[in-house]
Image (cartoon, helix red, strand yellow):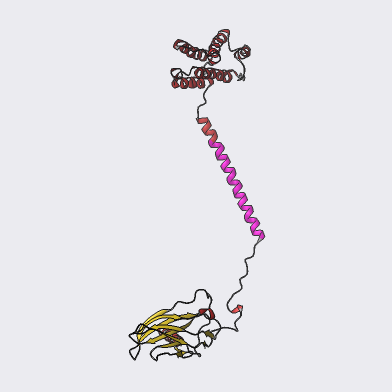
Amino acid sequence: MKQVIALIITTLCVAAFAKASELVERGGGPQDTSGDFEIRVLAPAEDTELPYDKSVPMTVELRFPSDASFQSLDLDFDDIPCFDCDAPPQPSPIQGTTEDNRKSVQLQYQLEPLQPPYEIPAITVTFQNAQGNDMTVTTEPFKLNIANADRSDATDDDYLEPVDPPGMDRVKLLRLLAWCGGVLLVLMLIGGSLWRTLHHRRAAATPQLTPYEIAQRDLNALLAEKLPEAGEYKRFYQRISGILRDYLENRFGVKAPRLTTEEFLRLLTSTPELVREHRELLQQFLTACDMVKFAAQVPDSPEINEITTSCRTFLDSTQPPPPTTAT
């Protein structure tokens, strides 16, 4: 049963389409100059019911002798209603042969579905005969009227459906914002706690160097650069005296980076952990460094070895004793 109904509906649709697409000769006759060249305008009949949103077909058929040729067609679309008048529909030439063995060229157009009647201007066609001469044929302007091609009685309600904008529930919006803010705050607290935990674990896992170990590390790195071998004596003595000054500041808490050697030694006399032998060794070391840094004295290899030995001796003699384990 369903197949029979579908077949009936399909047959009716095909029949309606065939009637709507049937073209008959319309418009004024051509101004024929030779009797062998002809222009026919084919369009739907006036009683043809076309939907208001479908284009209106129009075909311009040209008939001419078989030894002639079609050259050009002139049709001014500025006077024909269309949606886009700057780009008129382009013709699709279809060639064939008539019953009297003449050539036939059909140029098909699709007019925009606006209010009829259409004011079709004169159509001018240029042919070329067997002798190579141009032959011009022109039609009279005419009106093309199609029944039910427009919907002049339609209103906007027939085409548009009102759409209400979605409302905004402020209570739900505030709840959503509060919920998002709470989740964000919890995530920030968890992230901060994890960061602090990892930071403390990393700090606890990293061994802390003592002032003695830092000074030994820096001294070994300085000797590896071999500055005296490169002739940079002043820079070597500046670096090695700076290593010992940093050690004294970190080891005994003496913060005096801009003091002279005399002022620095005078400040160290109040440090009970430095005995007289330590202060004498430190005085000799710093004085030897000042002679190279400020008096431009050029040391030899024994003096360089001696200043290095003095630095290591001072470090070894002043490092704190290792902690004792209680039994």
**At which x and y percent is residue 100?**
34, 91
Q: Is residue 258 above or below residue 47?
A: above
Q: Which residues are magenta?
A: 170-198
Which of the two residues, 28 or 54, is positioned nearer the viewer here? Answer: 28
> What residue sits 58% from the left and 8% below the top?
276
The x and y percentages for residue 37 are: 39, 88
Q: Is residue 43 visible?
A: no
Give the residue displayed 53% in from the left and 31% down from the top: 203
Q: Is residue 182 magenta?
A: yes
Q: Is residue 235 above or below residue 67?
A: above
Q: Main secondary structure of the magenta part?
A: helix
Percent position of residue 300, x then y: 46, 11
In the image, 192 versus 304, the foreground residue is 304
Q: Could you tell me residue 78's position as x and y percent?
A: 53, 78
User: Total label count?
Assistant: 0
Residue 300 versus residue 201: which sits nearer the camera?
A: 300
